Image (tube, grey):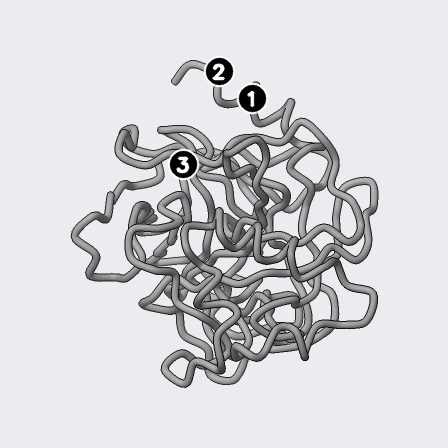
């Protein structure tokens, strides 16, 4: 999975999900009990058998989300992104549905030719969002266009994308009411590449588990937990959601921003959803 949307891979892009391994043997010393991982994985719609199985040779550096799961995970497809020399390129990002008309993603996914994040109508030839799918050919896919972008305040690398029409068939992620804490195990879902070498967006939604290592005022640092210690975000995973289970529902915890070339065992940086929740609710309530 990847953190940067730009076609070239960069150190700030999230890495792909790592090759599954034997979780009991590969977990870092001092990590949360395996029971906590299994509990989360079970609620993450039957992911436990996938995440804790022997290495999955069919998907490099990650595990595919089972069909019909994690429908909130969004895939952005952009064409005609401007450069300062007048040329254009195509790219992609990840995100999460947080309301029928709104998807949260990384702020740097929407920028001008100088790569300055922008609000308003996307300055691209096209900006398409796909939710409710686990593959590019999933018949359950809901396809929309982005009609408006709202950049988050205080320099947070987060944006809200308003959809051309509501998505009524997918349950959005809930917003958090409490702060994340070190040692929490979170789910990660994204449509990014599986390596920083010649990366391309995935045609399959990928998922895995990470552990919160550091908690700052606006961000958290996360590193791989399962299926492997180097499970991480990759290029085109910018905006991918980190989420947890609370009172029987899936809750957004943070939004992927950047990290080292993937796969890696270092920390990725993600912006805290609990800090941004008041702003997000304000945007969701705003009229068109």
Q: Dot 2 corresponds to which residue?
A: 285
Indicate left or right for 143 with 58 as reference. Answer: left
Identify the residue shown where x is 24% and y is 43%: 142
| Numbered tag placed on residue 121 in the rendering | 3
Identify the residue shown where x is 48% and y is 15%: 285
Looking at the image, do the residues carrying marks 2 and 1 touch, with CB atoms under 8 Å apart? yes
Q: Secondary structure at mark 2?
A: helix
Q: Nearer the viewer, mark 3 or mark 1?
A: 1
CA–CA distance in space, label 2 to label 1: 6 Å
Q: Secondary structure at mark 1?
A: helix
Tell me where residue 266 appears, x and y as whole percent.
74, 71
CA–CA distance in space, label 3 to label 1: 20 Å
The one of 210 and 40 positioned closer to us in this rendering: 40
Are there few (<14), some (14-19), or many (20+) residues within 10 Å of tag 1?
few
Label 3 vs 2, first from the N-terminus: 3
Tell me where residue 174 appears, x and y as whole percent.
52, 31
When the figure is inspected, residue 205 is found, relative to residue 118, above or below; the finding is: below
CA–CA distance in space, label 3 to label 2: 18 Å
Looking at the image, do the residues carrying marks 3 and 1 touch, with CB atoms under 8 Å apart? no
């Amino acid at each position: 999975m990847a953190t940067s949307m730009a076609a070239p891979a960069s150190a700030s892009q999230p890495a792909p999900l790592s090759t599954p391994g034997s979780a009991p043997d590969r977990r870092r010393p001092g990590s949360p009990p395996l029971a906590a991982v299994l509990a989360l994985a079970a609620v993450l719609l039957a992911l436990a058998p996938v995440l804790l199985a022997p290495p999955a040779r069919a998907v490099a550096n990650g595990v595919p989300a089972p069909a019909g799961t994690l429908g909130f995970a969004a895939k952005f497809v952009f064409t005609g992104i401007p450069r300062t020399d007048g040329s254009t390129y195509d790219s992609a990002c990840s995100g999460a549905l947080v309301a029928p008309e709104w998807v949260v993603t990384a702020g740097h996914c929407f920028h001008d030719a100088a790569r300055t994040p922008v609000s308003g109508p996307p300055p691209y030839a096209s900006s398409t969002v796909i939710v409710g799918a686990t593959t590019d050919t999933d018949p359950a896919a809901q396809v929309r266009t982005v009609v408006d972008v709202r950049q988050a305040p205080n320099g947070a690398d987060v944006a809200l994308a308003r959809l051309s029409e509501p998505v009524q068939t997918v349950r959005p992620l809930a917003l958090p009411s409490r702060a994340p804490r070190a040692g929490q195990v979170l789910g990660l879902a994204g449509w990014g590449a599986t390596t920083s070498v010649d990366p391309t967006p995935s045609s399959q939604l990928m998922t895995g588990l990470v552990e919160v290592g550091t908690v700052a005022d606006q961000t958290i640092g996360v590193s791989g937990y399962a299926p492997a210690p180097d499970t991480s975000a990759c290029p085109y995973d910018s905006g991918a959601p980190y989420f947890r289970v609370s009172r029987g529902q899936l809750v957004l915890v943070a939004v992927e921003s950047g990290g080292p070339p993937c796969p890696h065992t270092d920390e990725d940086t993600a912006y805290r959803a609990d800090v941004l929740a008041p702003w997000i609710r304000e945007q969701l309530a705003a009229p068109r």
